Amino acid sequence: MNNYSFSLQGAALTALGSGALFWPDAGLLVVSDLHLGKAERILRRGGSALPPYETRDTLSRLEADLAHTSARRVICLGDSFDDIAASQMLRDEETLWITRLQAGREWIWMEGNHDPGPVDFGGSHLAELSLGPLTFRHIAQPGAIGEVSGHYHPKASVSLRGRSISRPAFLLDDDRLILPAFGTYTGGLRTSAAALDRLMRQGAHAILTGPTPVAIPMPR
Amino acid sequence: MASLPPVFKEWFDAKGWSIHPHQQTMLDRADAPALLLIAPTGGGKTLSGFLPTLIDLSKSDHQGMHTLYISPLKALAADIRRNLTTPVEEMNLDVRIEERTGDTTQTMRKRQRADPPHILLTTPESLALLVSYPDAPHIFSGLKRVVIDEIHALAESKRGDQMMLALARLQRLCPDLKRVGLSATVEDPAAIAHLMARHPDPCEILLADPGPAPDISMLVTNEAPPWSGGGAAYAIPAVLDEVRKHKTTLIFHNTRAQAEIFFHNLWLANDEGLPIGIHHGSLDREQRTRVEGAMVRGELRAIVCTGSLDLGIDWGDVDLVIQIGAPKNVKRLVQRIGRANHRYNAPSKALLVPANRFEVVECVAALDAVLDGELDGDPRGPGPRDVLCQHILITACAGPFDACALYREVISAGAYTALSRAEFDACLDFCATGGYALRAYDRWQRLLQKNGLWQLRDPRAAQRIRMNIGTIQDTNTLKVRMRRNRGGKPLGEIEEGFAATLTQGDTFLIGGQIVKYEGLREMTVEVSRDSSRKPRIATFMGTKFATSTQLSARVQRMFTQEDWPELPSHTAEWLRLQRKVSQLPQPGRLLIESFPHEGRAHTVVYGFAGRNGQQTLGLLLTKRMEETGLHPLGFVATDYATMIWGLDAVEDPAPLFELTALQDGLETWLAGNAVMKRTFRASATIAGLIERNTPQARKSGRQAAFSSDILYDTLMRYDPDHLMLDITRQEALRGLIDFGRIEEMIARIDGRIDHIRLARLTPLAAPMLLEVGRVPVKGDAEERLLAEEAARLMETSGLAQISPPPVNKPRWRVGY
């Protein structure tokens, strides 16, 4: 898989086409907004029936990235579960799968607005974490420097004569990085949305995910 | 011979009518288990269907429902009620006639279930709903006859399959039920008879006098039609002339978009203000009713319309039918023309208006076909299993059922006579469990077996199932309203895909007026009036008819001629030019043209394989082009040719046609294609795997598309043998064509490929540019375009200079 490399506050980082972030020097893989158990939660809430395979799909993509990067540490950057109940209602094989992925790795569950409390999985549960020049938390804070966050599910579109391509995207400026949602079946927020426009500085980039991640000026 | 009872005889005499021979025969054969009448319009077809009913009701004191009438259109049911009420009242018969459609009020529906009328007029969907009620045996008790109107229209679609399954059900409730089908002229009456018979009983066919041949010709204009496009704007003055010369003219279009644009242009040229209306399926019901009313009262000189006005509506004094664009289907054309000039023994008059030069050729071919009495029609395959799945769920809503009994019932319906028990069981299992991949999810565990009978696991599911009854795959539409304080006037509907392309301030045409897009509120498009003379964008996406294979064979024959004295000079000249700059396709050879156009490499393959065949060829060739690194971007197919565009030009077509390479990985390529996903969405919706309607809210089309694509992908990955995928493959192949036919074609051509590389578009390729139904190809080309565009954006923004940031900055290392 092709990657896109860049640096944030001196840390050399790699955006993977899957939407995960890899920090080679720290052996760290970061994924955000997995929303595991989303189909189950929507159904539980009386919504329409979504195809129930999104958890497996998300986990198999995560497994592939772990194998590919040989990451020793993993940060799930919040909203890993669609809600606390969803984390308890995962099917046995999916729970086992997560445990298998965790084996031999340092694993950090960051709190998100969907999963604010601790979940019944091993690893640490944190609200935020600083590693070197970078700070990891779920929701970006205005004014933060070297911050890596998720939450907004940013997506960007490019219009190519007669066809428009819209993909989940990393947003990057000198101060911060916002990760796209990694989970299958998670919608996206256009980069032109006011919330993202306010957070990101002029000259920010959007790095589109896909077979070959590419950077464009963040569409506003 | 059955004679008319006195009261009927007197009524006929008072009207100065005598009974038509086929009406008499229908009366004589009233006890046949199934009877199909083929008669032209205006032949008193409807009355022949109801005469036995009215006579029977006049003689006896029948309790409950006597006759069920099913028509493909709500409007038709309303029309028939009015037409039947007249003789009933004039003969003073004690007969209650009511309609039941999607427009019937709740209270009325409830009353109809408790106390059914003698004659109930309904549609296939409303019938399916009635059959799903536990009190269906009560509702239909005493039912003696069922009349299916315009059965030729129903027989072409899944609506007909659903209706016949519901009839199989009714037949079990009322074993003596007699079936009557009324059909316009069709090529193969036996096929319709096969569909409507209760097998193994036969279905008799009755052919009425077809009446005089239609008077049909091509409209001659001073101005030559353009090379491509479907608007026929050039013909507006000539069409207005014809409208002036006739009493009432119907102007048919193949698509709603074309109807809107033509209507708009017609009004711009209509200096004397002739009363002209517009009528198509996307307009608001109220507006349609108003136009229909004005037409019946004879207040309109012309109506611009689409197929929605096609069926059965009383056409009043229409004395001219104009068809804009080539009639893609000769059968439909003849049926349309047959409706004009309602008198039984006068020929109907019609004019064809080709929209471009190629369509001139098509029109001439179609005229020949009509003269030869050649009608077209594709044979339909076996009964679709997605419809069967829905029928099984409907049956379960009505109460517990025995699988063997239901199977016997199902195979009594024509389309399903060849259904094997194993296929039936697979459908039943799908309804019960959702299939292997979905077995763990309660959601799809809908049936269970108890004491040998199948029933709903959760009786509350009946509500959801009923909400999703039907097989019509209307594209998702949004209502359009004028923006007012409390919801302005409804104008009609537009397709969701079209609505998604609108931004505030865009203007478009609807109902003949130009409106400005203001915004979207709760699934309603709000617009305001706009006085600009030119709408910024065209309305609606197009739907597409396939031309019959006979027609394309005729066109191909015309191409072999030395010259074309039968064609208007402008079109003959256009063909000569094609011969000069390139060549015309020749039998036994394959013509391929490659040329650049608007920055893309274009290749046109003239295979004359029919639209399905050309579509399949498009899929296969783009696969080979992707493999050989030509970066295809998409293709579009017509009945005659496939046009493919991409980033790199085809230098040598031979490798693209290598059979083994075409076959290799074909499954995977097809699986990822938009055609398959579209087919899956339709079938999964009919079979009840995807719900369009939920008690909470109507799902937006985009949501439905989103979840169906994910469902498709996951089933492909985890359960490729799932019943829904099996159905999808079968349906998609019916929509495409089996690979074998393409193999045959390639073998027949045997390398005799004429590849002509040109600097620009050829005359024959021009009409392809404006074809609707483009199929995108998502492959490497998209990635390359994206990379190029990203580079360009970075360059122009000046960000490229500072990105990626220099790597010689101090690197941070995390200590352990």
Image (cartoon, coloured by chain):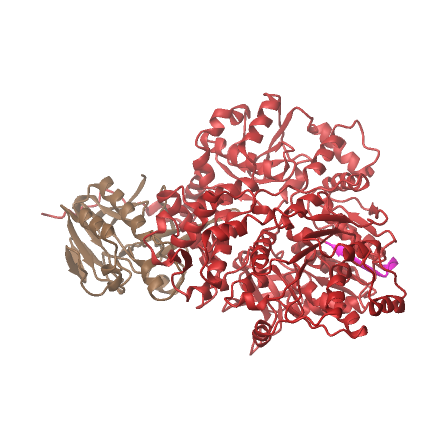
Chain colours: A brown, B red
Image coordinates for residue B112, horizontal then vertical, percent: 60, 72
Q: Quadrant of residue B137?
A: bottom right
Q: Residue furthest left?
A: B816
Can residue B512 be seen here?
A: no
Image coordinates for residue B448, horizontal then vertical, percent: 38, 57
In the displayed structure, would residue A64 be above or below residue B23?
above
In the displayed structure, would residue B195 be above or below residue B47?
above
Drawn side of residue A80 relative to residue B55, left or right: left
Image coordinates for residue B555, horizontal then vertical, percent: 73, 35
Drawn side of residue B667 relative to residue B611, left or right: left
Towards the viewer: B290 or B106: B106
Q: Residue furthest bottom?
A: B485
Does the segment drawn in magenta span residue B677? no
Residue at horizontal 75%, vertical 69%? Answer: B59
Drawn side of residue B124 relative to residue B254, left or right: left
Number of disc labels: 0
Residue at horizontal 44%, vertical 52%? Answer: B708
In the displayed structure, would residue A173 be above or below residue B770?
below
Name the image quarter holding the N terminus of chain B: bottom right
Q: Quadrant of residue A186?
A: bottom left
Q: Which residues are magenta?
A: B244-252
Image coordinates for residue B312, horizontal then vertical, percent: 73, 59
Can residue B578 be seen here?
A: yes
Towards the viewer: B722 or B193: B193
